[in-house]
């Protein structure tokens, strides 16, 4: 990375089922605790919606058309490519003075976790938002973040999440569990207790 060593950064990863409340929690945490929030899904959508020609590094070597097609098809992006996209974004933000990051929606596979460890850094915390499927499904459908966010799409995303979850948790053995079934305030308080050793108050 350009102006800072990778070891200088402090990274918290937040994973969970679609609709678990990851972005909502991270937005509040970032605002109150001085972290840069990167929602991987939102960032990828932003890249696809821009009309500007992107540096190939921004897209991890993909063309904008290819990335757009993958997002529209809701297919998992190859781990090497996704980590390259995230690493370059973090490098850009480091050059703007950001050294503390909370990233939600990543990793979604064990391979992505391994490549992130090698290419970026070992995260300080990996937190899992645990939410009952029926609650997450209701939230997912109501938020309508993307066209096609219906019950069938939730089941597809939830199935992928559950299939890949155990290997990710084995990789990050010291992961932390957050109950996401209650109120937003309760979830946030639980999250703060988990990450408090990092100096967060």
Image (cartoon, helix red, strand yellow):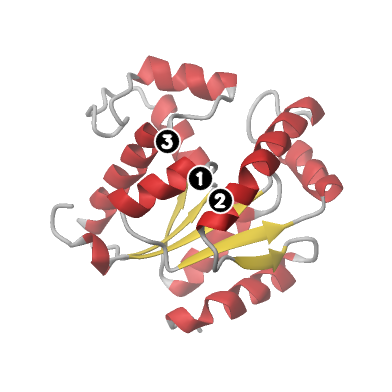
Q: Position of residue 78 (x, y in %)?
A: 43, 30
In terms of sequence position, does the residue under pointer 2 or pointer 1 come before the other?
A: 1
SS at circle 3: helix
Disc 1 secondary structure class: helix
Q: Is residue 64 above or below residue 195?
A: above
Q: Position of residue 24 (x, y in %)?
A: 62, 56
Which disc is residue 198 wearing?
Answer: none
Residue placed at 72% from the left, 35% from the top? 159
**Spatial CA span between label 2 and label 1:** 5 Å
Q: Quadrant of residue 34?
A: bottom left
Which residue position is annotated with label 3? Answer: 79
Q: Is residue 72 left or right of residue 99?
A: right
Residue at horizontal 45 percent and vertical 34 percent from the top: 44
Are there few (<14), some (14-19), or many (20+) residues within 10 Å of tag 1?
some
Residue 96 visible in this rendered orientation of the protein: no
List x then y, in percent, for residue 137. 80, 41
Callout 2–callout 1 Cβ contact below 8 Å = yes
Check disc 2 and report the residue beneath it. 168
Crowdedness near tag 3: few (<14), some (14–19) or many (≥20) residues, C-alpha within 10 Å: some
Q: Position of residue 15 (x, y in %)?
A: 59, 53
C-alpha span from label 3 to label 1? 9 Å
Q: Which residue is mark 1?
A: 110
């Amino acid at each position: 990375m350009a102006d800072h060593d990778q070891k200088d950064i402090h990274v918290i990863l937040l994973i969970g089922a679609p609709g678990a409340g990851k972005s909502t929690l991270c937005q509040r945490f970032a605002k109150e605790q001085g972290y840069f929030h990167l929602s991987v899904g939102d960032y990828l959508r932003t890249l696809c919606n821009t009309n500007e020609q992107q540096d190939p590094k921004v897209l991890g070597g993909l063309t904008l058309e290819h990335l757009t097609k993958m997002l529209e098809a809701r297919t998992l992006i190859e781990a090497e490519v996704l980590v390259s996209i995230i690493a370059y974004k973090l490098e850009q933000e480091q050059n703007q003075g950001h050294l503390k990051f909370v990233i939600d929606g990543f990793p979604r596979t064990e391979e992505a976790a391994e490549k992130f460890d090698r290419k970026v850094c070992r995260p300080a915390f990996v937190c899992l938002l645990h939410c009952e499927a029926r609650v997450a499904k209701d939230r997912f459908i109501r938020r309508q973040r993307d066209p096609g966010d219906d019950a069938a799409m939730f089941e597809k995303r939830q199935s992928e999440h559950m299939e890949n979850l155990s290997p990710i948790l084995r990789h990050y053995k010291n992961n932390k569990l957050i109950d996401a079934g209650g109120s937003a305030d309760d979830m946030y308080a639980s999250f703060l207790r988990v990450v408090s050793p990092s100096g967060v108050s």
